Structures are given as C-alpha cells and as structure tokens.
C-alpha cells in the first residue's frame, strides 16, 4: 500500500507539442486500476476466504458446518442474548445521546460546554478500559456504587456488571457519544425557522419538539438506532470482559472462544463470523436505503443555519443538573476509579483509609513489566503508519469517486465503504484464514495488524476525505488545469492542500481508533507484536489491575491530548480558510 | 484567430434517457484582438461551448483552431489537453485558491507544467506586471480570501493573463458582483482588453454586458447560434423574435403581412394597419409579429390619432424608475410597454395616443419562441 503511494514520479516526459496525444487519461486509468486492485485485495479477499472456509468440510463443499455450529449447546441462548444485548445497548445509547444532543444544540440550558465534553469523552476512552472501570463501579462484590446503595438498602437498584442489564448499560453509555454526534449534526442542520413558525402558530415548546423537531430528525434518528444495533452486535469488549465469566454469550464472544479454547474450532468461528457479517451488512444497507429515501424531504441541507435555542423556562436548571449527574456517572466516575486503581498496589474500595497507601509504583512498574514498552512502540508504529496510509489512499480514492469520470468509481466507493459492515473480530478471523497458510511471511508480524487496521478504517478515512474534497469546487481544479498544471501538479498543489484540514482531522481520528483497537488485534497479535489494548486485556486476564490502570491512565491522557490537538488544529486551519 | 466549426456536444439526459445536444453545430470565428460574446439564457449551451474551447469538456464533433493550431478535431482525432492549450480562463466563481496569497495565485501558472522551469526572477517580474495591470500590485502579500469580490475578480484576471494566453476565456465573470461594481468593472474590463489587445471570448446572460463590451455577439438558444453580429445589428435588427425578445425589452404585435414595398411593407393587426420598414423573410399573407422597442414608441397627449401608425389608448400602469417613466398602455385588446423621459408624465387612466415609427418596426416570423418562454407583452 505504501508502495502504491510512493509510486515513483513518471519520467518527466518530453515537452508535448500541442496537438500530440494526451497522456492524462492513460495515467488515471493505470492509477484507477492499481487502486481497485489494492482495494479489492483488502476488502474482497477476507470475504472470499471466510465463505470458502465456512462452506468446506472434510468432504468438500457443503452446509455441514452451519448445522454443526448452530447445534452447539447454548446456541438459542446465545442468539437471544445477542439480540437483547444489541437492542438494549442501542436503546440506552440512543436515548441518552439524542437527549444530550437536543439539549446541547437546541436549548438554553446552562453548562452546555460541559455537556459537549460529557458527550465526547467516552468516545476517546478505549472500550476495554471503560468496561473494566465499570466493573469496579457496579461489579458484583467490588463495585463502589453497588456497596454504597447496598449500605442504604437500595442495592437492588444497581444492576450487576456481570449480567445482561449491566452489560447493556455499560455498552450503551460507551456508545452514546456516537449517537450524540449523529444527532448533533441532525439538530444543527434543521432550519430553526421551521420550529419558530410552529411557535408562531401557537404551539408550546413540548408540542413543537414533539410535532416538528422530532419528526424532522426522524430519518437521522432511525439511522442512528440501526447503526447502534449493528455496533452492539459487533461489540467485543463488553461481552468479553463481562459476558464470558458470567456465561452471557453473544456472537463475538463465541467467535473468540472458538479460536481461543482447545480444540480450536475454525469452522464454527467462520460460520458465526459469516452470520454476524450478514446481519451487519443488511443493517447498514437498510440505513443507506433509508437515507436515500429521506433525502427527498430533507431539511438537512449543507447550509449552516445559525442554530436558535429554545427557552426551557423553569426547567433550565433541573435539566442541567440532570445532565451534570449524567456527566458524573458516565464520564467522571469511570475515570476516577481508573486513576484510583492505578495509585494503589492492590485494589481497595475507595475511602479514607487506603489514602495512606497511595503510590506511583504501578507507573514505575510499567517500565519493568516485560512487553509493555514494546506494545507501546508497536501501537505507535501501527497507528502512525495505518493512519497515514488510510488518509493518503482515501484521498486518491475519493478524488476518483467524486471528481474523475472514471468508469468504476461507484465500485470504488462501495469497496471502500464496505469494511464498515465488517466487525473487527470477523476481519480478524478472515485474516487468520488468509495468512495462516499464505506463503507470504505476514502471519504473526505487524504487517497483518497493519492490513487489518487499514481495511477497518478505510470507510472512516473515506468519510473525512470525501467530505473535505466535496468542498473543493470543481472550478478550483479547472483553473489549475487552465494554468497549465498537469494532473500531478493539480493534485499535489491544489487538491491536497485544500483537503488538508479534513485529512489531518481524519488522520488523528484513525490514530485514535487504531490505538484503541482490540477486536481484530486480539486475534492477530503474536508474542512480539502485542499492542497496548492487547496488553491491557492480558493484564486483566492475569489480574494485574494496578499496572493495567496505570497503563490505561497514560493511554487516556495521550488520546485526549491528541483529540484536543485535533480540535485546535482544525480551528486554526478553519480560521485561515474563512 | 479562434475558429470553431461544427461543434457538437451532447449530455446524457437522466429524465429522458437519451442524449440532449447542449451544443449543436456551432460555428464562429473570432478575429485577432476582438471581444466576442456568447449571449443567451441559462442552458443555451454558451458555457458548454466555452468549456469545449478551454478543453474542460470534450466535444463530440467539430474543430477548434487557435492561430492555425488545431486544439480539437474530431475528424483528425486530435484533442489537446486543457493544460497544454495556453488559454487563459476566468471562472464564474473566480476559483481563487484559498490556501495561497495573491502573489502565489498569479505565480502558479508559471510554476507548473510546461512552464515549471521559469526562473524565479522572471516569475516575480511577470507576476508583478500582471498584478499592476489589474491594479492589485499593492496587495501581493495578502491572503486571497481576504480580498473583496471585485478584487478577487481582478486577481482571477491577472492569473489568466500572466501566461500571455492566445485567447482569454471569460465565463460570466461579473455575475457574482453587485450591480454598481458590475457596471464599473465593465468599463475596466473593456479598457484592459483593448489596451492588452487580447482576443477574448466572453459568456454572459446579461444583455447589457454583451451590448456594452463586445465587438461581436452570438445570441444562442438551445445549443445553436440564433444570430451573430455586432451589438447594433443584434439590438436594432433582430433576425427573429427570440433575439428581439431576449436582447432588450420589446413589444410584439401579432398581424399578417399584407403588402411588400422594398424591404418594408404593411402589416394588418387587430388594431389597424402598420407600416413597417423592415420585413424579415416573410411573404404576403403570412402571419408575423411586429417588434418595436418601448423607448422608440412616442407617447402623445392628443386623444385623436392623426396619421399612420398611430393608435389611441389609455394608461393602465405607470412606474417611475428614476431615469424614465415606464408605462403599460392598453390599445384595443393589446397591452403595449413604452417608455418616456421622466419629465413627460401621464397619469393612470389618461387617454393618450401612441406613435410607432415605421423605421423601428420590424416584422418577424411568428412563434420561433417556445411557448414556455416569457414575453414582455401578451398580444392577441
């Protein structure tokens, strides 16, 4: 992939006399071909291997594996749990995310910046850390909240982390920032004058919200619900940390289990992977279909309306306090408990007494524990290389999709967006199948992780590249062409610089999600290629919670700094553009 | 200098599932140093023609030659890429690169493609010269996005001129400016064009721009050239009712040609007989429309018509537009627009007499305008 991007500049051609044949279409064709081949390799080969593996038994092709996989004891429970878990966490995330977004955009509730922060932070914290910190908040006999409420006789109010309700809440809270972002955009881009005219017609605020605002964002909301259900099905961290010990199995944990307990059942893993893939692909297709249909009455134009706020009247403060509470529960307490854990040699329930034993020894131990520094190094290398590769690659793809007249451009778009439907665990399974037998010495190296990350994050890179490229007017390129610039000149000196803010933002995003990535890495790492999230997972398995928390705190701090830098940078570039 | 012949360009039409010809057999020649304008309503193919000349669209058929060099020829299979044509172009949106300052924007054409080896000092010299020509020399270091609309327009012009193009192509360069600025830039553009002696192809839908700046105008409609000629002939001697209607404001009176005498003759209308000095391509007994411009109609206070081409009517509406009075006057079943100096005022409902001078009346074939297009006057 990097090779593609570093394609040596074509030999400087002899000055073409006007009238001679043109070289540009030829160059685009070659580039288009190369891009398609690479994309197809990244996206299609996992599918092919997965299907092939799932449908071959000892006797050749057949459906035997399917029957076998679904006759494993506990399968009905697993299916039911998957559905309950996914829809439950979608419910939690959609309700909280939409409410947050609504009050953040459309109300005059005080403390709005805090709301915004509350809604973003869980997005930055790796899922594995978020889940583990919740174990210490509401888990069985260690949970702080658990103990607090039990102390006043209300223990039944707090669900156990190691149960389906607990998993639903934790996963839902972790995913709610995604809903927040989707709905934030939807609320922002509806024309406030539509609401104002409802008010002028005599409607009260609740009536306006119910009759005008919500119907207007209904397409976005439905889309968000579907996306969240899909994400719930793909979710690995919560089912792995909380579900496996308590026997609450879902698809992802079953796949992991099939590959990690003896005897290894590749067939079962591939059948479950295929099922999961089918469901997620269908779900996302449905989202696409709905979005296409809704464009018709879309009030969500690209126009930047100045969002007008509604007066909440006497509800201003109650609403704010409610969200303050949410902020404390969903953001502050998990982070605090993580910090607390990292400062104690062994875990004790927070209180006055253990204060005396606070120490930084866990942080010091990070440097001594075997493999930690290596995993940090691996994570950094992978994040930087895959983010760079993804952004450069998608910059070219999105140019071909949006700006060229290249025939296969629709296909390119489809290929580059497809990994969105591919759960990380499924991709991991497929890559195992490909490279376990491949003569290429890729299995067990960082390259296989690199391939996984690049494939997984192509759609995200695509989104950033395409949206920033869409803002580059065609005339800006055409005027470069009229100035005598070749395609390469135009791309390098006009298109890329104008896309830069979007590319940088996308780059940082990919870095952040690569560092958090666990569900592919967990299947693909080897002794020498551990990454940070895998190390945390191993600490958890070994019960080394102190070091785990110390590493987690460092990770969160660095990720937050990165995101803050991205915002700053975005703002700065944005200002220069204005 | 610039020769376009038999140019055709079709686009796939999504709604009709066929190809529509955006440009249909367009041919014209632009003389060295002259200012040529393509004028027409939106969708008439003027911008597509310009983009074909620029090389941004590939024509289906035809030939484009500049200075004897073939840029495009479907029969010889030649198509020179846009970046090798050495043409300058100013876009409707100006297409100023927002990530560069004024100097870099103008220097860009000298630093890329075939001109990439231009020496630093020459670049500097040529950029400064181009900026001085358009009067932006003092703003060289400023960020391009910090310029006003008029300045951006001039910057785009400087960037197009810096390569000393064989032909300068302008795609509605004034349409994004407010009215006042637009008028003052008309003068400036015309002055620049004449001083630099650049062969210019200009595209606009604004007839005032076309009439005021051009040496020659091609009025386009539905992909074809409807009339081609100098501004006076296009305005004063339209060859069909589309041109009469699109260029300036006009009245149409329906009638039948009754008699020929020389170029002119008489036309019978519902309100009486009209003597016209110009009958375009019509035989006796054929249906026609007589076109006459509002400002050429004389309005008189007398109530009794006292000669040929005179009609009595009443003022229906009058508008004061500052420099003149605009009237709608009912004559029989027709409503006629006319215009008088602001000093000559008639109140609403007042009976008056109109005189339609024969030398300004032109009889044209009826109904070459599509039914959908608006007319200034509805005649019965």
Image (cartoon, rainbow, N blue to C red):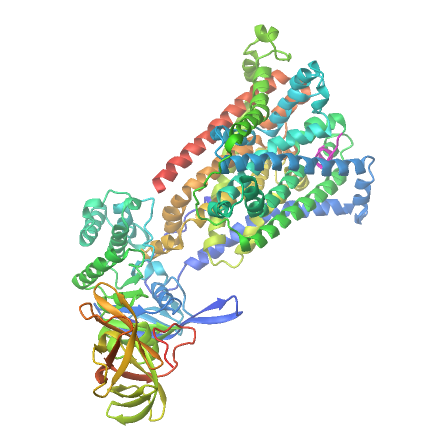
In the figure, is residue B366 to the left or right of B30? right
Q: Would you place residue B17 above or below residue A260 in this image?
A: below
Query: Looking at the picture, how far across and down is residue A242, in whole percent?
Result: 70, 27
In the figure, is residue A541 to the left or right of A106? right
Instruction: Give yes or no for residue A251 being in the magenta stretch.
Output: yes
Query: Looking at the picture, how far across and down is residue A469, in whole percent?
Result: 44, 48
Q: Would you place residue A192 above or below residue B93 in this image?
A: above
Residue projecting furthest to the left: B195
In the figure, is residue A74 to the left or right of A173? right
Instruction: Give yes or no for residue B229 being in the magenta stretch.
Output: no
The C terminus of chain A sits in image quarter: top left
In this orientation, does residue A97 appear? yes
Residue bounds of the magenta highlight: A248-256
Q: Would you place residue B337 above or below residue A107 in this image?
A: below
A86 and A328: which is toward the camera: A328
In this orientation, does residue A518 appear? no
Query: Looking at the picture, how far across and down is residue A450, in whole percent?
Result: 56, 37
A320 and B328: which is toward the camera: B328
**Identity of the residue drawn at 59% across and 38% down:** A452
**Identity of the residue drawn at 27% across and 56% down:** B160
- Helix, strand or loop: magenta stretch: helix
Query: Looking at the picture, how far across and down is residue A493, in whole percent?
Result: 36, 47
A216 and A51: which is toward the camera: A216
Quarter of the view holding residue B357? bottom left
């Amino acid at each position: 992939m990097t090779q593609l991007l570093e394609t040596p500049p074509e030999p400087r051609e002899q000055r073409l006399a006007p009238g001679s044949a043109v070289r540009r279409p030829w160059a685009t064709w070659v580039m288009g071909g190369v891009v398609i081949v690479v994309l197809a390799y990244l996206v299609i080969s996992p599918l092919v291997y997965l299907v092939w593996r799932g449908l071959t038994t000892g006797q050749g092709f057949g459906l035997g594996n399917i029957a076998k996989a679904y006759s494993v004891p506990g399968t009905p429970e697993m299916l039911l749990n998957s559905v309950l878990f996914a829809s439950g966490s979608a419910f939690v995330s959609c309700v909280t995310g939409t409410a947050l977004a609504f009050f953040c955009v459309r109300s005059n509730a005080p403390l709005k910046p805090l709301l915004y922060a509350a809604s973003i932070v869980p997005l930055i914290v790796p899922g594995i850390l978020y889940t583990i910190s919740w174990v210490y908040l509401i888990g069985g006999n260690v949970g702080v909240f658990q103990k607090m409420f039990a102390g006043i006789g209300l223990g039944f109010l707090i669900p156990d982390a190691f149960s389906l309700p607990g998993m639903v809440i934790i996963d839902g809270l972790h995913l709610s920032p995604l809903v927040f972002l989707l709905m934030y955009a939807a609320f922002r881009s509806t024309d406030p004058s539509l609401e104002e005219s409802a008010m002028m017609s005599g409607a009260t605020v609740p009536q306006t919200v119910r009759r005008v605002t919500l119907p207007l964002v209904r397409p976005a909301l439905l889309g968000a619900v579907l996306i969240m259900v899909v994400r719930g099905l793909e979710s690995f961290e919560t089912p792995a940390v909380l579900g496996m010990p308590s026997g609450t199995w879902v698809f992802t944990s079953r796949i992991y289990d099939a590959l990690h307990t003896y005897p290894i059942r590749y067939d079962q893993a591939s059948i479950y992977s295929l099922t999961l893939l089918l469901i997620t692909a269908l779900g996302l297709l449905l989202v696409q279909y709905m979005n296409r249909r809704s464009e018709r009455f879309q009030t969500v134009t690209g126009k930047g309306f100045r969002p007008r706020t509604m007066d909440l009247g006497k509800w201003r403060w109650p609403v704010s306090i409610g969200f303050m509470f949410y902020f404390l529960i969903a953001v502050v307490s998990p982070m605090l408990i993580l910090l607390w854990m990292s400062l104690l040699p062994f875990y004790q329930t927070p209180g006055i007494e253990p204060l005396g034993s606070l120490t930084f020894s866990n942080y010091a131990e990070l440097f001594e524990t075997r493999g930690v520094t290596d995993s940090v190094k691996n994570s950094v290398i992978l994040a930087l290389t895959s983010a760079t590769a993804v952004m450069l690659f998608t910059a070219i793809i999105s140019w071909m999709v949006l700006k060229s007249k290249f025939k296969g451009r629709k296909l390119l778009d489809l290929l580059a967006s497809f990994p969105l439907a591919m759960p990380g665990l499924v991709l991991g399974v497929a890559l195992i199948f490909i490279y376990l037998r491949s003569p290429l010495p890729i299995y067990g190296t960082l390259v296989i992780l690199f391939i996984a990350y690049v494939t997984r994050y192509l759609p995200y890179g695509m989104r950033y590249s395409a949206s920033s490229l869409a803002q580059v007017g065609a005339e800006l390129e055409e005027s470069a062409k009229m100035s005598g610039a070749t395609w390469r000149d135009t791309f390098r000196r006009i298109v890329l610089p104008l896309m830069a803010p979007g590319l940088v933002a996308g780059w940082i995003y990919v870095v952040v999600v690569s560092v958090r990535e666990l569900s592919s890495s967990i299947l693909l790492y080897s002794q020498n290629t551990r990454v940070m999230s895998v190390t945390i997972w191993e600490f958890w398995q070994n019960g080394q919670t102190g070091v785990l928390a110390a590493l987690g705190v460092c990770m969160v701090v660095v990720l937050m700094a990165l995101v803050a830098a991205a915002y700053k940078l975005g703002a700065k570039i944005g200002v220069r553009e204005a | 200098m610039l020769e376009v012949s038999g140019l055709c360009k079709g686009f796939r039409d999504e709604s009709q599932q066929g190809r529509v010809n955006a440009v249909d057999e367009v041919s014209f020649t632009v003389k060295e140093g002259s200012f040529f304008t393509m004028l027409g309503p939106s969708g008439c193919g003027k911008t597509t023609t310009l983009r074909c000349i620029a090389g941004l669209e590939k024509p289906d058929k035809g030939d484009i030659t500049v200075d004897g060099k073939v840029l495009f020829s479907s029969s010889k299979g030649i198509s020179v890429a846009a970046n090798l044509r050495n043409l300058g172009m100013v876009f409707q949106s100006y297409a100023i690169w927002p990530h560069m300052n004024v100097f870099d924007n103008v220097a860009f054409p000298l630093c890329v493609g075939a001109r990439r080896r231009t020496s630093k000092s020459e670049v500097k010299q040529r950029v400064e010269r181009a900026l001085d020509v358009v009067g932006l020399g003092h703003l060289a270091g400023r960020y391009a996005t910090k310029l006003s609309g008029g300045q951006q327009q001039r910057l785009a012009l400087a960037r197009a001129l810096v390569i000393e193009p064989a032909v300068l192509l302008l795609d509605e360069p004034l349409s994004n400016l407010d009215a006042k600025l637009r008028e003052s830039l008309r003068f400036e553009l015309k002055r620049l064009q004449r001083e630099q002696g650049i062969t210019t192809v200009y595209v606009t839908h604004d007839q005032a721009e076309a009439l005021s700046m051009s040496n020659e105008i091609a009025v386009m409609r539905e992909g074809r050239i409807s009339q081609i000629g100098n501004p006076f002939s296009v305005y004063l001697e339209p060859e069909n009712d589309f041109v009469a209607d699109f260029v300036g404001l006009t009245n149409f009176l329906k009638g039948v040609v009754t008699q020929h005498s020389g170029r002119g003759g008489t036309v019978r209308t519902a309100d009486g007989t009209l003597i016209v000095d110009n009958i375009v391509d019509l035989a006796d007994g054929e249906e026609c429309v007589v076109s006459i411009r509002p400002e050429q109609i004389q309005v008189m206070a007398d109530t009794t018509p006292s000669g040929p081409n005179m009609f009595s009517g009443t003022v229906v509406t009058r508008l004061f537009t500052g420099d003149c009075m605009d009237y709608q006057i009912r004559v029989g079943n027709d409503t006629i627009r006319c215009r008088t100096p602001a000093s000559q005022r008639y109140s609403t409902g007042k009976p008056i007499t109109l005189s339609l001078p024969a030398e300004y009346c032109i009889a044209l074939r009826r109904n070459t305008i599509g039914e959908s297009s608006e007319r200034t006057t509805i005649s019965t």
